[in-house]
Each structure stands twice: as C-alpha cells, then as structure tokens.
Image (cartoon, rainbow, N blue to C red):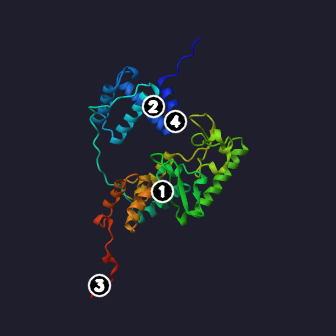
Amino acid sequence: MSKTPPKLLDQLAEACRIRNYSFRTEQAYSMWARQYIRFHNMAHPRDMGEDEVAKFLTHLSINRGVSPNSQNQALNALNFLYRNVLNQPLEEVVGVVRSKKQQKLPTVLTQTEVRAVLKELEAPYWLLAALMYGSGLRLMESLRLRTKDIDFDYRAIMVRNGKGAKDRVVTLPDELVRPLLAQFSHAELLHQKDLADGYGRVELPHALKRKWPNADRDFQWQYAFPSFSRSKNPRSGEVGRHHVHEQSMQRKFKAAVLSSGIKKQATCHSLRHSFATHLLERGADIRTVQEQLGHSDVRTTQIYTHVIKRGGRAVRSPLSDIVGFTDE
C-alpha cells in the first residue's frame, strides 16, 4: 500500500523547519499560502503561477489595504512555497499594485512618561520594559533572552538571531544588574522544580540538540523570563517552560500606559523608539545608535532625528557650551 503524501501546508511547515525558520515565520508562511489558495477558489498552487500571484498581491493592496511589509511577506511566503515545496520557482512577478508606504514618525515617550509607565508595571513586566528602554531591545528580543546571553561583568547583552537573523551586543544598564540577578534566581528556582518534576527541557536553536543532547536541561540555556506555567511545544509536542508570552507583556504595557494617564498611542516598541531618541538627544553619535539598534542602514536610524524637538538633525550647537554670554 502506497503511503499518502503529506498535505501541502504540512510540506510547507516541514520545509520551514528543515531550514531552521522560526515558528512565527512558519505560521506566517502557512497563513499566506492558505489565503492565496482561498483567493483563487481553492485551486492548487501547482496549477497557478506568476499571474495568479500578482493578482493576489494586488488584491492585498487594493482591497485589503495591507502594509508594504505585509505584502512583501506574502510574496516571500509564496516564493518559498513555489521554490522549496513545489520545485516550481517563480519567475519575476510583474504588474503588482504595490502598497504605499506611509512615513510615520514613531511614538516617543519622554523620560518622565517612561518613569510613570514603569511605576505601573509589576515584576517581571517592569524589568522587561526597562530592558526595552534601557538597552533598545525589541519585545521579542527581550523575551527570548537566555540566561547565558547576559554578561554582568562587561555590562553587555548578546542579542542572538535578532531581526534579519543578525546578532549584536548592546549595553546592559548598571541599574538593571541587581534586578536581573534577582530574576535569574527566580528563574533558577523554577528550573530546579521543573527538573524535579521530570521536565526542565527547553527548546534549543537550530541543531544544537543533536550536538549537545543534554544542553536543553542546562540552566544557561533557560529563558531569563520563563513563563508562569509549562506548555506543550507546538512542534515537538514536548512539555516544557517557554518564555513569557508577548501578548501578556503587550496587555500589561497597554494597561500601564492607560493607568499612568499618558494620552499617546504608545506600545512596547515605543520604548525602543524612546531609547534611540533620548540617546541622540544626549549627543550620541548616530552610528553608535544604529549599532545598538541593529539597523542595517543608517537611514532607518535617521528617522529619530526628525522626532527630536531640538531640530537641526539632532546636532548640538557648540554655542550651548558658552555659558552666560547673553548676559554680557
């Protein structure tokens, strides 16, 4: 009896896992493939091609009003599907109505507002927020920190596999050393309890589990901000302790903004925007800020110079160093 071939979306998921794509990317690619098939009345992708892809992408722009990033992600997903699952690489997709990118200035909180929000947050959420503001981390970069990624001696945080699959080193503020050490103690207690209960294994990046079979039980690989309860890994089915869920942090932050009385439409990412803006206001070189944020292009970082009320592209005039000359 011949074995039934796996379904298309199962093949897509397997192709993502073989290439060590994140679970979030796997979910996104599967979602776009599903929408593409439904848009074309359940036709199989092997029977379609560049024209159908162009029509779908145009639909996303005109009828759905998706952002340019979402439209690009949909194209990446379909390119991946055709190239790595169907073995029918797409030629150039032409005639697509592109989504218009609107240049919006980021929402930036003042230092007083950041302080007010932090006061409304409880552990471990206030510490996560402090890391986003104090080190310029993205939300997921903060949540995915492993205990081994923080070097207290050198006051450094290693951000691994950040946006664009890039690693970088950022500053660990002195003020967060003691709170982080306390957080590590809490995380280690949870880990010891998990081990005693027959659990304690954490998902490892890439092929490290094959290289070091027992590394997933080592505390250095555990998340610095473990979840409050164990859960089942959606890929392996193993029960373990993941990191704090991003939606939990987002809800807590939104509630803190409301309770602090701040009227801005601030999100967790506003803390990263505030970090960059306040560094420039203090006279930091834009290349330094670019490196801390992990931007590939300095033009991405330059948007913060437009936020600074001082104007003049954040250049601090030397006249500011001449004290009292107007009184003469």
Mark before the other along the chain sequence, 2 or 1: 2
Q: Earlier in the sequence, mark 3 or mark 1?
A: 1
The residue identified by callout 1 is 132
Q: Does dot 4 land on a helix, a strand or a loop?
A: loop
The x, y position of residue 79, in whole percent, is 40, 32
**Residue wearing tag 4:** 19
* Distance CA(mark 3)–CA(mark 4): 64 Å
| Distance between mark 2 and mark 4 Cα atoms | 15 Å
Mark 2 or mark 3, which is nearer the start of the sequence?
Answer: 2
x 50%, y 26%: residue: 11
Q: Residues within 10 Å of mark 2 (few under 14, many from 20)?
A: many
Circle 2 is placed at which residue position? 30
Asked whether 301 or 145 is in front, the reply is: 301
Looking at the image, do the residues carrying marks 2 and 1 touch, with CB atoms under 8 Å apart?
no
Select label 3 or label 4 by which is in front.
4
Residue 176 coordinates in the image, percent (x, y): 55, 63
Residue located at (51% from left, 47% from top)? 161
Image disc number at residue 325: 3
Residue 275 coordinates in the image, percent (x, y): 43, 60
Label 3, label 1: how far apart the Cα atoms are: 40 Å
Q: Amino acid at mark 2?
A: Ser
How far apart in space, not on screen, are marks 3 and 2 (Cα)? 65 Å
Question: What type is the residue that disc 3 sits on?
Answer: Phe
